Amino acid sequence: MRLHAPSRRELLLASGTLFAWAHLPRLAYAEGRDPRFLAIILRGALDGLATVAPVGDPDWLALRGSNALTLDGKSPALKLNDFFALNPAMPNLQRLFQGNEAIIVHACATPYRERSHFDGQDLLESGLPKPGPSDSGWLNRSLAGLALGGRVDPKGSRVFAVGPVTPLVVRGPAPVLSWSPQQIMPASDDTIARLLDLYRHSDVKLASVLEDNSKISAIEHPGGMAPKPGGPNPGQVRAYFSEAAGNAAKFLAQPDGPRVGALALDGWDTHVNEGIANGRLSQLLGALDDALGAVKANMGPAWQETVVVLATEFGRTARINGTDGTDHGTATVALLVGGALKGGRVIADWPGLKSADLYENRDLKPTTDLRAVIKGVLKDHLRADDRVLAQTVFPGSDGVKPMAGLVA
Amino acid sequence: MTPRGQDAAALALHRFGFGPVGDSIAAIANDPRGALIADLDRPGAGQIAAILPSAADSARQVFDFRAQQQAEQKLALRAKREADASNASMSGSMSGAAGMSDAANTAPVAAAPPPKPANQPPPLPQQLLVSEAKVRFDAATTADVGFVERLVWFWSNHFCISADKVVGMAGPYEREAIRPHVIGRFANLLLAVESHPAMLFYLDNVESMGANSVAGINRDKGLNENLARETLELHTLGVRSGYTQADVTSFAKVLTGWAWIPPSEPDHGGEFAFVKRLHEPGDQVVLGKRYPDTGVEQGRAVLADLARLPATAQHLAGKLASHFVADNPPPPLVAKLAKTFTATDGDLKEVAKTLVMADESWTPQRQKLKPPAEWIAGVIRLSGAQATIPIGRIMYAQMTLGEPLWRPAAPNGYPDTEAAWVDGIPHRIDIASEFAGRAQAADPLVLLKNGLGPLASPDTRNTIARAETRTQALALLVMTPEFLRR
């Protein structure tokens, strides 16, 4: 794949936004810092327990059985501390953690307590307390709410979105620039599998065509090495994630580039054959891990002033379901990386894994509000105002205090 | 059977239009047939409002562009030769041959191509094609129903040319020869097509000359049968409908002289011209009828008769029914269309109305697989992404799916059967995912209602409702059997 860093002109052409970058006023920072912020939305509901496993919890093995990540065995999890260990597909994240450049918040959730992807994603990105239509996201509103002449000037700064469509989280009153990766990622295995299932029930001709297509073989043998011409192989997913995230970093790193950005990476809805240590989820997490490495590399010196927040709409069931996967759940992890963090910590008010500890006897119970985490970063990193955070950015969140001490 | 209600409305949009847009299913549910007829009766139906260069103008622009390119290459070559020569003389004592080869190997600075400026606009022929493509695609994706646009696409493919050969003229050809006549008289459509310089160039008639014409005698050259044969075989009567090689030859003689003014002519280059110097003199017998040599009128007379023959009516009726309804259309439907065609002297609007009014057109079984480009237009209409998906991505998608715009491999155009397109279904999933990713995907339940209405099966509803993201829901929806088929 060709990694392509577009010029400003190309960027503007690609986004169709024809304002002149050169006429943007320079960022007017009263202080010496020049903070960068990137939000990565993981759509589809990331399995937090498969990403950061509570290996020190006495009920862990009983809960997940042979699907439980452990510190020994064939694919040992990567130790973070005495209680938590990271999915083996994420060595970059482990290194960042060890270098105090990553924070993991566990048993974390938005205020949403139902299990619809669409509503959950809307709420995650809109920042509203309840599901419902919204035409703006918390990141855009936080930028619009920053004081003029502050560190991040809403007139001089642009929210930057990567991807073919601007994610809701950056839509809103502040102007948005967007850029799409050159590479189009082929449809996901998951989409193909869903269609195959539909065709088998409703259109045998279409089903047979899809079955004949070689791309299907690997779906039915997850983790296998079967070649899949035309389909998105793990390499393509890795390349796409890295290009999207890496290019976002290149723009944020530029002296006169945007200062906040967002992108969305899909595909985390692992109902069947989840492949936690060696399969689909493992490949996706590996791709995400590469993408984090690309962000750090492309940020250059600006990495020291960077915070990246990775969040998903909700978690997955604590137990494995009948098809070696997990269904829609509640609490999960939020990942923070960046040189500006006071990292090397897992922040969790651990709820436990006994049946009585689980939310509705099925999901990891949420004990930390994701909004507290994001508000903490926006406040200490971008210097957002408490009142604006409580009323405009996350309306109705007065009771959710910004988490202190995330940023160094 | 009187089609009515949301079922019929959804059927009307998918089968006769370019698919639903917004809440169009609900909007036409009162009278789906009436909505289709109204599309035919719309003032200016089929026409394009945008001002774009004519075929002749485009041909001249392309000629000038190529001449300019050629001159630049010549200058570069000349500079290279001069540099080579001076290098060779500087290398002094070296033997001539070795010196020349050395000089050639050192890639002299003067011969290096100038560095391409960044963001150079695409070459002129590509620009012309893209602006035509955009206008055409916009017409399909913004139409209320799109029945007339579907007819434009049908007739354009029936009378196809290739933009690979007829550079710069493919778009103007469709606007000038096809669009004005899709709901007019077939005889006029046929004449406009066969006398259009794009077709005359595409099927080599500009090269054809009578062996006994002035030019033929002087140049010892003669007939090219291509246009005559394809007019009989593809455009009118249909293959194996009774004409003979003698008919083809005679008709080719009739058509000699149907040519164009070379695009190098600054004023009228690229326009149609009847060149008497090329025309085979004398009467010709085509399909048993004698046509006196009346110059250009001889060809017009043959075309006018071809347009009215029963075999033509049968051929076109079969193609129309197969295109809109099923690969193997109900024979009574074909018969009705042929009957109207003959009874109205080839009034294509009346034929289209017969198609809409025939009960056989409304079979609830939806067997016909939409060809790729029509499906793409439907995807864009449903997703509301008319403004967000650039024409370049659309053209790329058409190419990926095997139906690049105005570039069929042969004069019989793109195929129109399931067998030809069904193997591309896996590739459509990729396109669906990409385009869904570029749209602001709406609520999946609204999409279901707007895109399929009551046509959605319970399995389809479940599949959409369980999608991982709204984007995936949209991609899945346009890949459901109900959306892929009409």
Image (cartoon, coloured by chain):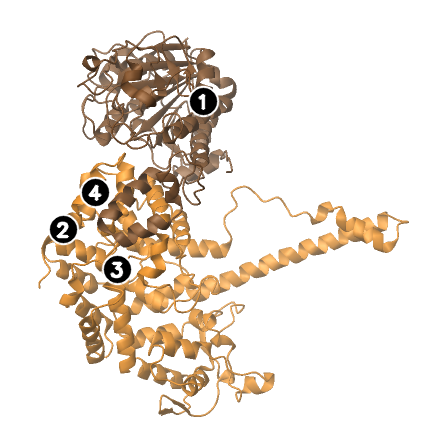
Chain colours: A brown, B orange
Judged by depth in the image, the label closer to the viewer, 1 or 3, is 3
Q: In this view, does B79 lie to the left or right of A41?
A: right
Q: In this view, does B467 lie above or below B173?
A: above
Q: Is residue A265 above or below residue B275?
A: above
The subunit letter for the residue under badge 2 reads B
On the image, numbered disc 4 is attached to which residue? B447
Q: In the rendering, which numbered label is found on residue B23?
A: none
The subunit letter for the residue under badge 3 reads B
Q: What element carries label 4?
A: helix
Cα–Cα span, label 3 and label 2: 24 Å
On the image, numbered disc 3 is attached to which residue? B368
Q: Are marks 1 and 3 on the same chain?
A: no
Q: Is residue A232 left or right of residue B8?
A: right
Judged by depth in the image, the label closer to the viewer, 1 or 2, is 2
Circle 2 residues within 10 Å: few <14, some 14–19, many ≥20: some
Q: What element carries label 1?
A: loop
Q: Which amino acid does label 3 sit on?
A: Lys
On the image, numbered disc 1 is attached to which residue? A26
Cα–Cα span, label 1 and label 2: 51 Å
